[in-house]
Each structure stands twice: as C-alpha cells, then as structure tokens.
Image (cartoon, helix red, strand yellow):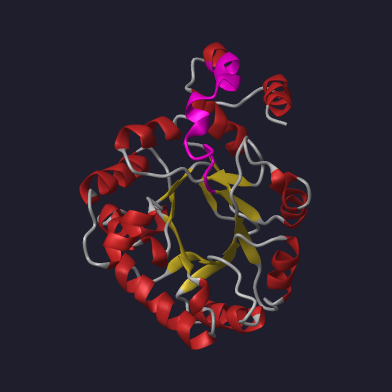
Amino acid sequence: MRLKEFAKTGRKISVIGMGTYYDPLWIATAFLGWRRGAAPKVEAIRAGLDAGITLVDTAEIYGSEPLVAEAIQGRKRDEVFLATKVWPSHLHRDALVRSFNKSLKRLRTSYIDLYQVHWPNPRVPIRETMDAMEELIAEGKLTHVGVSNFNLDQLKEAQAALPKSELSSLQPDYSLVNRSLEAEVLPYCDREKIAVLAYYPLGHGKLSSDSRLESVSSNRGKSKAQVALQWLAGKDNVFPIPRASRAEHVRENAGASDWELSGQERLELDAKFR
C-alpha cells in the first residue's frame, strides 16, 4: 500500500482509505441498538487494515464507530489514522465537546486523529466550533481538524477561525462522475495543502460497471473500480474513501494503490468523463 503525506502534517497515510457510511436504514436501526450485518462489516475493515489501509473514516451519525473500535482492537494505535465527524446540531462548544467524548468512548481510544464538521451550520458561529476544536487539540485528545461538505467560502472561513492550528482536510463528494470540485475548490485545496477525502469515489457504485473505463481496465488488467480509485489516489492531495462493507471489495479497492495511471490514460479518462 502506497503512503503519502496528509496535508501539512508530515504524517503519511494510505492513499486509499475506508468509509463506514452504509445506508439510512443502517443508521436508523443502529441508533435503536440493532447493527444488522455487523460481523461482515467488521471483517471488511479488518481486511483493509491487513491490506495496508491505515485511514478509516466514520461519524457519530453513522452508527459505525463501535464497529471501527472492534476492528482495530489489537492493532498498534499509531498505525491507524482514525477520522470521525460531528453532526451540525452539535457545533456549539459544549455540545461539540460532549459529542467528541462520546466518539472517543465508542471508538475505545484516547485520541482521534481527525475530527471533522460533518456539514456547515449557519446558525452556529464557525469560530465557536473551531475554538472548541483547538481546546481538544490543547488537551491532547485531537490531532487534526477537518470539515465536510463545505463550499469554498465556508472552507476559507473555517481556516480563518483556527488561529493556532491548521485546517487539514475537506471531505467532499468527488469522483469521475462528479467533478464539480475541480472548478475552484480542488485548486484551492492543492495550493493550501488541504487534504481531500473523497467520498462516493465510485459514484454510488456506478463506476464499477461504467463502459468508459473498459479500455484502461482491459489494458491494465485492473477492475473498473480500481481504475476509478487510482484516478483519484494518483492526485497529490486526494484520498478516496470507498465504503468498507465486504472484505472482497475492500481487498479489490486496496489494489488500486500499487500502480499508477499514465499521463495519457489520465487524459483519456478526463476526456471521457467531462
């Protein structure tokens, strides 16, 4: 598994990550205490870790933090980069700290590598949210701060609200079939060295069977999913985080990291997916 630097941190993490959002029904039942099909999901996360994936992304709303905790038990903590998210109704200072500590408990860890604002909330001043984040950093419970689903103006505002720290990451919907990020946000993140954790990197699964990937897939002997993931992972600052729900799919996803698309192949894909 190839590694690359995460933002300006000096820390290198796997170029492919794992996401643990499953579906709305999973979330609803998880909050009622029923985590249906939990065992295969834990097995999938473990398979990714065994394959060298170090980045695992979750969120308080997903209901999957306990599965992540189970999957990483027995691993060296500094070999796993744990990212989770706080829901927008919990962005006031006291609510954020409570949510963070609950995530710590569910993840069974003493610190979180990356804590992200899941969605912006215009009713809560971003400075209040980021002040709370910096308190957690000062206490040694948090290492890095990120945001998710922020537009460019909101991203800049979040940056400015962190006087003592760096904004390390943005988590957007980004793939070959959703390239709106490339107009303004991606160039800005590249300039600022803000890592991009791309969710839905396979376009809700559509790219696994998209005929436009057939030529590169056949020539390289790689699956279409691996081609689509490598298109993202080969970018300097982008870390795709496909869902980890089945071990065989996670192993396939991990296989997108040990090779690189040529410049000509990238041009071909760029043209086909404009």
Looking at the picture, how far across and down is residue 228, in whole percent?
56, 31
Is 98 displayed left or right of 125 in the figure?
A: left
Is 228 displayed left or right of 205 in the figure?
A: right
Q: How many marks?
A: 0
Residue visible at 41% across and 70% down in the picture = 111
Front-lying residue, 273 or 267: 273
Residue 25 is at least partly visible in this image: yes
Q: State the residue lying farthest toward the bottom.
A: 94
Asked where in the image residue 203 lies, by quadrant, the reply is top right
Q: Where 48 falls versus 196 (above or below)? A: above
Q: Where 3 falls versus 269 (above or below)? A: below
Is 32 displayed left or right of 18 in the figure?
A: left
Residue visible at 66% across and 81% down in the picture = 127
Looking at the picture, how far across and down is residue 16, in whole percent?
50, 41
Residue visible at 30% across and 45% down in the picture = 46
Looking at the picture, how far across and down is residue 82, in whole percent?
43, 59
Looking at the picture, how far across and down is residue 78, in whole percent?
41, 58
Residue 257 is at least partly visible in this image: no
Asked where in the image residue 171 lies, by quadrant, the reply is bottom right
Front-lying residue, 77 or 172: 172
Query: Is residue 216 a member of the stretch shown in magenta?
Result: yes
Is 29 displayed left or right of 142 in the figure?
A: left
Which contiguous range is marked in magenta? 199-217
For the C terminus, the quadrant is top right
Q: Where 213 falls versus 178 (above or below)? A: above
Residue visible at 28% across and 47% down in the picture = 41
Q: Where 74 falls versus 270 (above or below)? A: below
